[in-house]
Image (cartoon, rainbow, N blue to C red):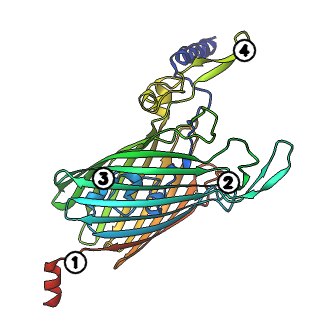
Amino acid sequence: MQKMKIYLLLLFTCVLLTEKGFCQEQNNPISTAVPFLLIAPDARSGGMGDNGVSSTPDVYSMYWNPAKYAFEDKQFGVGIGYVPWLRGLVNDIGLSSIAAFWKFGDKQAIAASLRFFSMGSVTFTNDIGQELGDVKPNEWTIDATYARKFSREFSGAVAGRFIYSNLVPVQLGNNLENVRPGTSVAADIALYYHHEMTIAGLTGAYINFGLDISNIGVKISYSSVSNIRDFIPTNLRLGPSFTMDIDEYNRLSLSLDLNKLLVPTAPIKVYDSVAKNYVITKGMDNNVSVVQGMLQSFYDAPYGLTEEFQEINVSAAVEYWYNKLFAIRGGYFWESKYKGDRQFFTLGAGLRYNVFGLDFSYLIPVKNNNPLQNTMQFTLLFNFEQVTKKDKQQSKE
């Protein structure tokens, strides 16, 4: 009898919490157009659990936090990367990228990047199953940024981006009515804080904090006649990092990233046989403007506050450098089972020699049969330091 009372009490509690949005039992991931914009393009951050909003600056800061470029200690850098995607399912999908930055003076930097996402070979058919041909859909984006220091410890950046999504290549355009490639423009706003501190006599200790709101842009459409337009993945990324020079040769960094899509959550709908239409039973209408969608994304989850927290992805990372020549990295990425259920560990390594750099990463899924398993990334880097008059004089001596 006592066990029955406890069971009924737990059941009543769950029912009560369900009414308040705390007993979610339904998957409700947020979907957007051009999701390739959220794929980590570089192997360094890929080896750190997709982490990078407050890590030390590098060539690929454009994707994680462009305000970091203002604290870059090199004058010029170029990076080239490739990410095989969904290798557990197919072998011809991947993201290629190239990024470059130029720093002028001590306070300012500009940078640009290009990302190209190939979806491999796809066979299109019509309504009766007749093959229309094999094509290779693709998407790409090109962007540029300007970063500037506001003080010795604080910097900011703005970035602009053009997005092109060709899901149905032009050679099939005559067979599919009113279908066209989708285009959009977007902007990023980023801030970076870098504070040097002394801990237990160690002078090479730093606390960093980063904030980046990326892909703030217009909705995208793939039809010339339809009013249906999809959100692009506007994303809020923020977090701290701590870096410590243990001695002259050894450096250790710890970092934490929190990510949330600033896109409205789809409501729960049921079909009303009387009205002959779907009606919202939980949540809010997600057919809103971009600005309204960004604001609404903080409070529109059908299952309340708990679901809002479930929409936050967490990544934690550690990075060790020996003599600024060799690095070992590790990370963990967590996403709620109701929002996509991506959970994985990553390992990575890096090598720097003169102007040359090479990064590698490998993904280890927490759960079996993850389409991301066995994903390896490679990034090739070239960094060039500025040669000052003082350096030239010392070299002559």
Q: Are marks 1 and 2 in contact (CB under 8 Å)?
A: no
Q: Which element is circle 2 on? A: helix
Q: Is residue 12 left or right of residue 305?
A: right
Furthest-bottom residue in this view: 397
Residue identified by numbered label 3: 67
Mark 1 or 4, nearer chain start: 4
Crowding at dot 2, Cα within 10 Å, few <14 / some 14-19 / many 20+, comes out as some
Q: Is residue 66 above or below residue 215?
A: below
**Residue 301 showing in the rendered view:** yes
Q: Mark 1 or mark 4: which is in front?
A: 4
Q: Is residue 8 above or below residue 55?
A: above
Q: Mark 1 or mark 2: which is in front?
A: 2
Q: Is residue 99 above or below residue 139?
A: below
> Which quadrant would the C terminus be assigned to in this image?
bottom left
Residue depicted at x 63% and y 40%: 223
Give the image quarter of residue 323. bottom left
Give the image quarter of residue 2. top right
Q: Which element is circle 1 on? A: loop
Residue 276: numbered disc: 4
Crowding at dot 4, Cα within 10 Å, few <14 / some 14-19 / many 20+, comes out as few
Residue identified by numbered label 1: 387
Residue depicted at x 17% and y 57%: 200
Mark 1 or 3, nearer chain start: 3
Viewer-proximal residue among 314 and 148: 148
Q: Mark 3 or mark 2: which is in front?
A: 2
Q: Are marks 2 and 4 in contact (CB under 8 Å)?
A: no
Q: Position of residue 375 (x, y in %)?
A: 59, 60
Q: Position of residue 285 (x, y in %)?
A: 54, 22
Mark 1 or 2, nearer chain start: 2
Mark 2 or 4, nearer chain start: 2
Residue identified by numbered label 2: 170
